[in-house]
Structures are given as structure tokens and as C-alpha cells.
Amino acid sequence: MFGAIVRVHDENVDTVNRASEQDFQTFFEENLDRIIGYAFSIVQNTQEAGDIAVESLARAYAAWRRLDGTDHRRAWVFRTTLNLGIDHLRRQKRSKTRPGIDEAFAEIPLGSAATTLDTTGDLATNRAELVVALRRLPERQREAVAMHYLGGFAVAEVAEVMGIGPETVKTHLARGMKVLRTEFGVQNQGGQS
């Protein structure tokens, strides 16, 4: 009897493990570019952003079954990415080295909202200018703008990842976009961010 229970338990565990691995694979494929883009918005270096994204996803894989629900998982991964990015910047600051603007701007995975700031220039120039402009924003505004406009997160998701209320996220978004619009000479259309 005990042997039959163990076999059934093992079969259920194998089924759960396969389902979890499939869930993770789907999550990975759907979110990898966003995670790399978000990491880049923090560290401004493509290779380091890739390393941070891989580490974040490796930690997510290890904790995958403990994380419940797709939205919670995504928020957890982006929060882990943020923490890893901040840790990286702290280590870099301690070593007295500062990152330059990465020469591989063309690799930045940006959403359509970010690429429409200047319709007269080429995409690589727009990306470079956007990264420079994002660097000038205060940290919390930069995080909110990057997650919402570049990462495609809803305001509630940004709030969860950043550990703040949705109204605070909206304030960060409005202030950040106001600065970016001013810098790029773009008029606010209809009061939308």
C-alpha cells in the first residue's frame, strides 16, 4: 500500500514539475525582452543588463513553485531584477567606476511608446537620446517610466514591484513624462501619459 502511495505521489510530483517547467518556459519567452530592457534602464549597459536578467530568471526558476499566480511571478521577477540592478550599481560605486552609455543602443528592447518620441530621427538616435534622458530622471521616476512605458506594466503592477501605491506610481509617471516631453519638445496630447 505504502509503495503504491509513493508511486502515485511521485507521478503527481513529476506532472507538477513538468507543468511548472512549461509555465516557466512560457513566462521566460514572454518576458525576457522586458526583463533585459528593465535591467538596462537601471544599469545602462547591455551586457550587464543581460547578466542581471539571467540571474533574476535563475532565481525565479529556483523559486517558481513557491510563487503563485502569473502576475505575482512577474512582479517578483521584476522586483528581483531591480534589486540585482541596485546591488550592481552599489558595487560599481564602491569600486569608483562609472558606466558609460553603452554603445550597443540598437540592442535595447523598447516598446512602441518609447520609439515615437522623435519621428524625424533614426531609431538608434532616438534610443540613445531616450537613455540619456532617462538617466537624468530621479531614480523612482526612471523606474516607474521604464516599467510602465518600456516594460508594458500596468500601474498596479508597477506599484507592486516598486512597493508603493498606485497613486504614487501615477505621480512618478506624470512627473517623469513631463520632463521627457519637455526635453524632446513633445506636446502632451489630451493629458495622457
Image (cartoon, grey):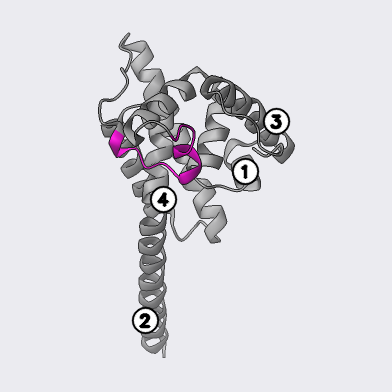
How far across and down, in percent of the image, does residue 54 sit?
31, 44
Residue 87 in sight from this viewpoint: no
Describe the element under mark 2 as helix, strand or loop.
helix
What's the CA distance linking mark 4 and mark 3?
Answer: 30 Å
How far across and down, in percent of the image, does residue 162 sit?
59, 36
What's the CA distance linking mark 3 and mark 2?
Answer: 50 Å
**Residue position for label 4:** 60
**Residue position for label 3:** 171
How far across and down, in percent of the image, does residue 159 sit?
64, 40
Figure check: 154 above or below 100: below
Circle number at residue 160: 1
Q: Residue at x 65, y 32 (%)?
A: 188
Circle number at residue 11: 2
Q: Residue at x 74, y 37 (%)?
A: 167
Is 189 magenta? The answer is no
Mark 3 or mark 1: name the one nearer the start of the chain: 1
- Taking the view exactly as shown, the residue that stands out farthest to the right is 167
> Do the residues bearing badges 3 and 2 touch, measured as CB atoms within 8 Å?
no
- Mark 2 is surrounded, within 10 Å at the Cα level, by few (under 14), some (14 to 19) or many (20 or more) other residues, namely few
Figure check: 25 above or below 177: below
Judge depth for marks 3 and 2 and give the one in front. Answer: 3
Q: Tell me which segment is drawn in magenta.
A: 106-119
Q: Please state which amino acid type lies under the numbered disc 4.
A: Ala
What's the CA distance linking mark 1 and mark 2?
Answer: 36 Å
